[in-house]
Amino acid sequence: MPVKGNNYFSVLGQGIKEIFKTKEVIVLIFHRIFLGTFIGLFAWCYQAYLLDRGVELFFVGICFVVLAILKLSGYKFLSILVSKLKNQHIKLSLNLTTVFTGIMFVLLSFPFPVGFCIFFMILVEFFGNTQRIYYIRGINRAVSSNRATAFSAINGIGGIILAIFYFIVAVSSIDIYALFSITGFLIIGFSVACIRLLKSEYL
């Protein structure tokens, strides 16, 4: 029998209240959900992109392994780097890495040699997925209790948005080069707008 005031829905409600109590936390959450959706889109599309560029399936598999390793190593490296930065530099580093990721998406939409495009993809994986560092750091600073519940609620919202967005992309049959270009400009514009609303103490 659940303890009164401590059942699933009450804890979930407390977590949601904790998440949405300040503007900065809301902005940080939507920044992470938005960017996470597009980075996930990249992971979904890059193999088809390489095949369209004439890369052999065997080498596409090698790229998959390399990008997976870089995703993990980049997260580890930047998590150490961010932990050593002063608070006033955290916001700048978030802005630079996010805008840089958007620029790499845009460059992938141009007919550069395949070697350059693979390099751009490596940079997307290295910097794009590390945005989670700033997100976790910010939420841990802003949410004083029920953090696990708060993260679960955020992941649930993100999953719904991701599913809807991927469905729209799938049924629209948009050209993959146009998709990368649009994605890049959206990342740059949306992220700059969000980061301008964030205060350094929330990162």
Image: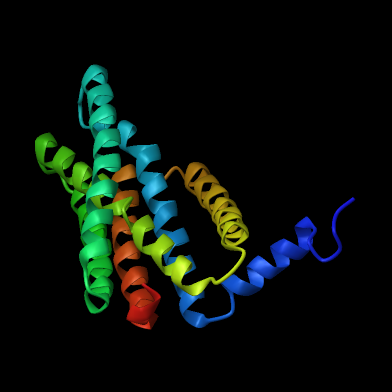
In this orientation, does residue 51 appear?
A: no
Q: Residue at x 46, y 66 (%)?
A: 140
Q: Residue at x 60, y 54 (%)?
A: 156
Which quadrant of the rendered structure holds the C terminus? bottom left
Instruction: Tell me where residue 77 appears, x and y as whole percent.
Output: 22, 49
Instruction: Tell me where residue 91 appears, x and y as whole percent.
Output: 28, 74
Q: Residue at x 59, y 62 (%)?
A: 150
Instruction: Tell me where residue 37 appears, x and y as whole percent.
Output: 44, 53
* 62 lies above or below 128: above
* 191 lies above or below 38: below
Q: How many marks?
A: 0
Compared across the picture, whether 2 is left or right of 81 comes to right
Instruction: Tell me where residue 22 appears, x and y as whole percent.
Output: 53, 81
In this orientation, does residue 162 appear?
A: yes
Depth order, front residue of 63/151: 151
Depth order, front residue of 150/160: 150
Depth order, front residue of 176/161: 161
Q: Residue at x 27, y 76 (%)?
A: 87
Compared across the picture, whether 119 is left or right of 132 comes to left
